[in-house]
Image (cartoon, rainbow, N blue to C red):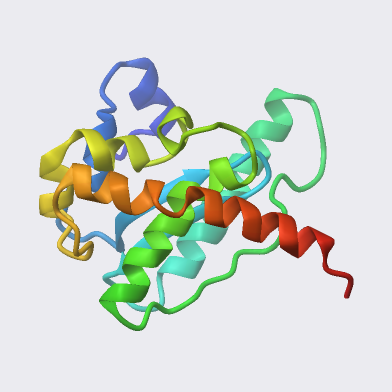
Amino acid sequence: VKERFSWAIKKGKYVYKSVFLQKENQLFRLICYCVMPDHYHLLVRILKEGTFSKYINDLENSYTRFFNIKFKRKGPLWQSAFKSVRIKNDEQLLHVTRYIHINPTTNNLVNRPEDWEFSSYKDYIKDGSLLTNLTEVSITNPDSYKRFIDNRINYQKKLRLIKRLILE
C-alpha cells in the first residue's frame, strides 16, 4: 500500500534530497525546479514516454484541490496550462537550468537566487555530489555553476524590463 505524501511528511518519513535520486520504475528524472507564486518550472528527463503529461495533470489537479479546500477558495492556481519543450542538446539544457534558477531574481522576488527557498538552486551550489550525479548538467563544480548563474542575473533583469517596455 502506497502512503500519501502528506502522511509521509507528518510522520517524518519524507527526505527532501530523495527527489533527485534515481529510483527503479521512475516516470521521469528531476533535473531542476523552481516554484514561483503563480507558476512553476520543472526540468525533467522523461524515462517512460507518454506518462509525464498525465502525471503533471494529476499533480496539478490534486494540489489545486488540496489548496482550494485548505484556504476555502475556488478556481485555478497556476498562471496557464502545462506546457512542455523538448531540449535538443546539452548546451540548451544548461541554459534552461540557468533560466529556471534565475527566475526568482528576474521577477524581483529575491536579490540572489540562493535566497529563494522553493528552488533546486541551493542544492546545486551547496552539494557537490548533486551536480556530479546529475549527468545531464555539464558543469559539475558548484562554484563554477554559481559563477555561470551570477554572470547572467543582471542581463536577465534588463531583458525582462525591456520586454515590458515593448508595445505589441
What residue is rendered at 30% in x and 74% in y? 91
Q: Which of 47 and 112 is in front in this view?
A: 112
Vertical order, 38 against 148 (above or below): above
Q: Which of 55 and 160 is in front in this view?
A: 160
Residue at image x 54%, y 32%? 111
Q: In this view, does 111 lie to the left or right of 3?
A: right
Location of residue 99 in the rendering, given as x and y in whole percent from the top left corner = 47, 58
Taking 31 as reference, is 21 left or right? left
- Image quadrant for the C terminus? bottom right
Q: Can residue 20 be seen in this view?
A: yes
Q: Residue furthest right?
A: 167
The quadrant holding residue 80 is bottom right
Q: Residue at x 32, y 35 (%)?
A: 122
Kindly indicate the quadrant of the structure image that contains residue 90: bottom left
Near-viewer residue (20 or 164): 164
Residue at the top extreme of this rendering: 11
In the rendered image, which quarter contains the N terminus? top left
Where's residue 88, x and y in %? 35, 83
Q: Can residue 23 be seen in this view?
A: no
